[in-house]
Image (cartoon, rainbow, N blue to C red):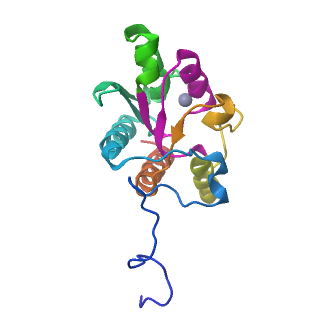
């Protein structure tokens, strides 16, 4: 693959770098995506979300994982998807973190907390997040990416919910993401989950 013109790893030319890590490219596609910057120091939280998502796949659940972090950067709670293993389609990790937060945190602590997640909140979880008054959301991959992957794989959309972004559901919600290299890992987990499911194991 001699490189003629493929921009693969452009030398020294302006890959958007800012202070933190490169977020999604700055084009019109971002209109439905988060607008904030994901700082490099936040990546370990997102990587933990992806580990949890991988655990979910190993258990037979959908590949989603989320982590709740306080204002000082301490992980307070984490969970992964448990829909298949519990038979409860509302057992999304983002929803579980809301339940944990309203039980354990004051409104001020909730507002100062950040929820990291492998995939952007679905409308149910976004609504719960908004009602609980939780703070910033940072996701590795967006709902739009998940829809694009399904379309690419010819997989029907099975969600009964409208395809709304977090900010469609909670106007003014601070959101950042996706992070391309981590989104690719989420994509691989989604693919692995589907392969396993179609293989029937
Ligand atoms: Zn959800």
**Residue 124: where, in percent of width, then height?**
61, 25
Residue 96 seen by the camera: no
Task: Say how many tags the image has.
Answer: 0
Q: Which residues are magenta?
A: 114-143
| Residue occupying the point 64% across, 35% down | 167
- Magenta span includes 138: yes
Q: Nearer the viewer, residue 46 or 73?
A: 73
Q: Looking at the image, which residue sits at the far right?
A: 162
Quadrant, the C terminus: top left
**Residue 85: where, in percent of width, then height?**
43, 26
Where does ligand 1 appear, by image quarter? top right
Where, by quadrant of the figure, is residue 117 drawn? Answer: top left
- Magenta span includes 194: no
Q: Nearer the viewer, residue 124 or 53?
A: 124
Q: Nearer the viewer, residue 63 or 103?
A: 103
Quadrant, the N terminus: bottom left
| Residue occupying the point 51% across, 44% down | 36
| Residue occupying the point 57% across, 60% down | 26
**Residue 42: where, in percent of width, then height?**
34, 42
Residue 85 seen by the camera: yes
Residue 59 higher or lower than 2, as above or below: above
């Amino acid at each position: 693959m001699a490189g003629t013109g493929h921009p693969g790893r452009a030398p020294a030319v302006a890959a958007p770098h800012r202070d933190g890590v490169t977020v999604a490219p700055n084009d019109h596609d971002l209109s439905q995506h988060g607008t904030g910057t994901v700082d490099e120091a936040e990546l370990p939280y997102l990587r933990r979300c992806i580990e949890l998502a991988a655990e979910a796949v190993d258990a037979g659940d959908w590949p989603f994982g989320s982590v709740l972090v306080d204002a000082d950067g301490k992980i307070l709670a984490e969970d992964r998807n448990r829909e298949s293993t519990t038979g409860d389609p509302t057992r999304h990790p983002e929803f579980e973190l809301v339940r944990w937060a309203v039980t354990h945190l004051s409104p001020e602590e909730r507002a100062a907390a950040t929820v990291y997640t492998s995939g952007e909140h679905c409308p149910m979880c976004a609504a719960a997040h908004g009602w609980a008054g939780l703070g910033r959301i940072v996701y590795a991959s967006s709902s739009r990416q998940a829809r694009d992957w399904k379309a690419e794989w010819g997989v029907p959309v099975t969600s009964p919910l409208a395809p709304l972004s977090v900010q469609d559901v909670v106007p003014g919600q601070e959101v950042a993401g996706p992070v391309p290299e981590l989104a690719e890992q989420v994509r691989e987990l989604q693919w692995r989950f589907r392969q396993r499911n179609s293989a029937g194991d």
